[in-house]
Image (spheres, helix red, strand yellow):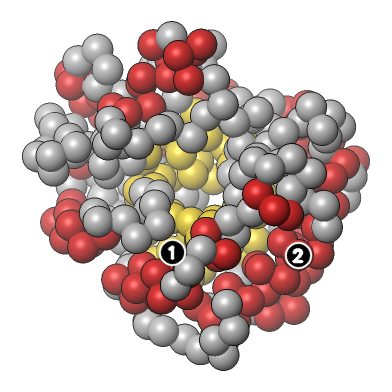
Amino acid sequence: MGASPRRTGAAMIDSLMLWNEPNNMSHWDFEIDPKWSRFAELARSAAQAIAAERPELLRVLGGISPIDPGFIDNMKQQGVLEHVDVVAVHGFPLDWNHWQINEWPDKVAEIERLVRQPVWVTEVGVSTFGAEEVQLFGLERTAELLIGRVPRIHWYSLFDLPRAWPATTRHREAEGSSYYRHFYMGLLREDGTPKLAAKKFHEYAPELGLCQWFHFEDHRLESAVRWLKELGVRKLRTGLSWADSYRPNADAWFDKQMRALEDFDLTVTYCFTPEHLGERPHHTSPPKRVEEFADFCARMTRRYAAG
């Protein structure tokens, strides 16, 4: 925690995202914060802290899921949009959303009408829960609909989630098949072998980027880098966890992760509340003091996005 700020690699960080899916209960506890006023305070504070360190970096409002114009209007009314350069959305119409894949342009337009900022799609994907052919269709149709329509697209994700790990959700089996679809979102199976869509992905890269979260001391990091390069990926979205920053040897892991990703143009997401700093002991909880999240954002920006 006390290491001096330094640039550990040549990673091209061009944008920093403030949280992930803040309008989704699996990532923000809006039972505690029903009007998102605490989130708005956190986002404004973090955006200002990042701007103080690197004003030229794009600040991205955490990708929303579901795509909800009402939430964006809420953020506008609370002054959040004055502090961000990009608004991001996430969509999974073949797995979780209640709209069809062909509605993607309309969903983007719903948000564009409310904001002056560009709208990015920072997570879009299709599971192979039913069949690999469904994911392949979803990849092809998503590329047709969104490449050239929005400035940035990140397919989710490279790897299937290992079955021994829990999905980041608070509902588990109560969600039925929706919960288990989390485990089949990768272009690669858990054993690292490619699915049908992986063999097609290079046709859409680099216009189609990728989103891959890495767990603390993730054993898949080196393999991920090899596959990302083979697939032709240039733009990668990943994250640095505020909660993980309190683990032993956290900075060493963050250094390793960022050094490994130095050849990609990165959107780095800052999120997840440390249990001991939340109103509740859970990574979705609003923190007791939003300034502590802003301090984390400033420290990570100094360390990995130094001028």
Query: Closer to the camera: disc 2 or disc 1?
Result: 2
Give the residue number, with chain letter if any, for mark 2: 292
Q: Between marks 2 and 1, how big is the CA–CA gap?
A: 24 Å
| Residue contact between numbered discs 2 and 1, judged by CB atoms under 8 Å | no
Q: Name the kind of residue labelled 2 in the image.
A: Glu
Q: Residue 253 vs residue 205: left or right?
A: right
Report crowding for label 1: few under 14, some 14 to 19, many 20 or more residues within 10 A (C-alpha).
many
Q: Name the kind of residue labelled 1 in the image.
A: Leu
Residue 4 badge? none
Q: Secondary structure at mark 1?
A: strand
Q: Residue 282 vs residue 129: left or right?
A: right
Q: Residue at x 73, y 54 (%)?
A: 277
- x, y percent for residue 227: 17, 54
Q: Residue 292 vs residue 2: left or right?
A: right
Q: Which of the two residues, 129 or 59, is positioned nearer the viewer here?
A: 129
Give the residue number, with chain letter if any, for mark 1: 266
Report crowding for label 2: few under 14, some 14 to 19, many 20 or more residues within 10 A (C-alpha).
some
- x, y percent for residue 116: 73, 48
- x, y percent for residue 149: 47, 39
Q: Which of the two residues, 255 or 59, is positioned nearer the viewer here?
A: 255
Q: Residue at x 82, y 33 (%)?
A: 32
Q: Residue at x 48, y 56 (%)?
A: 239
Q: Secondary structure at mark 2?
A: helix
Going from the N terminus, do you reach mark 2 or mark 1 first?
Answer: 1
Q: Which of the two residues, 204 or 127, is positioned nearer the viewer here?
A: 127
Picture quarter containing residue 270? bottom right
